[in-house]
Image (cartoon, rainbow, N blue to C red):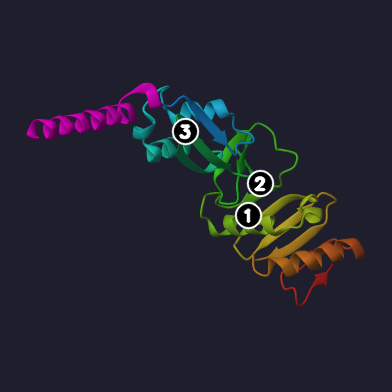
Amino acid sequence: MKARTAFLVLLTAGVVGTAAWLVFFSPVLGVRSIEIVGNLTVPSERIKQQAGVADLHPLATVDLAGVQSRVLGIRQLASAKVDRVWPGTLKIEVVEREPLAAIAAGGKFAVVDKQGVVIEIKSALPPLLPLLKVDRPAEGDPAMMAALQVIQALPDQVASKVREVRAGTAEGVTLELSDGRTVVWGGPDRPKEKARILASLLKREKAAIYDVSSPDVVTLK
């Protein structure tokens, strides 16, 4: 009986050891493919290279947090989620940063997202983005963040007409339209009201300056 028990213990230990070896050390359950989801402009191959996971690396021992950190080294990406999909796939789901405006810098143009993060540098102003002018173009600067909030709040029919956004302060955002008209927007407060009023005024009223900084008292000049 003791011999049989000892045999069963050894057999069980052998099975467990083999299973552990297969999962944690063997290429049998290694990474055979990397699936990239959510990317629109960043090539999948670039994300795979940035992930830095070798072929057949045991899937169970992939450092998911490490992969996520490396992938987010690509500035065009706002977030990344990394998961194991058994038996041999590493899935990386990303969200790209959306370009919102461009800032002139040293003869080139820095494209930024809603958080003021520089996504890329362009040699020419992207045709669909407004030029943003602030005194201190940096992430977290109050005037810059206010201006970006305003750009985000603009309805499509207005946003397509904006060629330049200026902000001396967080409460002093001004829009220059492609036809030369000026919109005094003010601060980022009450964006829906301001956007609705402005869209209506641009259709009905001819003026050089539209001041919607106080939606309760709109003025035209």
Magenta extent: 1-30
Pointers 2 and 3 in contact (C-beta within 8 Å): no
Q: Where residue 126 appears, x then y in whole percent?
A: 71, 38
Quarter of the rendering containing residue 119: top right
**Residue that label 2 marks:** 101
Q: Which mark is residue 90?
A: 3
- Front residue of this view, candidates 21 and 161: 21
Magenta portion: prevailing SS class: helix
- Front residue of this view, candidates 107 and 20: 20
**Mark 3 Cα within 10 Å, few/some/many (few <14, many 20+)?**
many
**Mark 2 Cα within 10 Å, few/some/many (few <14, many 20+)?**
many
Left or right of residue 128, residue 92 in this image: left
Task: Tell me the mark number nearer the camera, choosing from 3 and 1.
Answer: 3
Q: Where residue 95 appears, x then y in whole percent?
A: 57, 43
Q: Which mark is residue 190?
A: none
- Front residue of this view, candidates 163 and 4: 4
Q: Where residue 25 appears, x then y in whole percent?
A: 30, 26
- Which residue corresponds to the image point at 33% horizontal and 23% vertical from the top-left? 26
Q: Quadrant of the N terminus?
A: top left
Up-down: is 120 above or below 193? above
Q: CA distance from mark 3 to mark 1?
A: 36 Å
Up-down: is 7 above or below 220? above
Say whether residue 108 is visible: yes
Which badge, 1 or 2, is on the more N-terminal residue? 2
- Which residue corresponds to the image point at 64% horizontal and 36% vertical from the top-left? 40
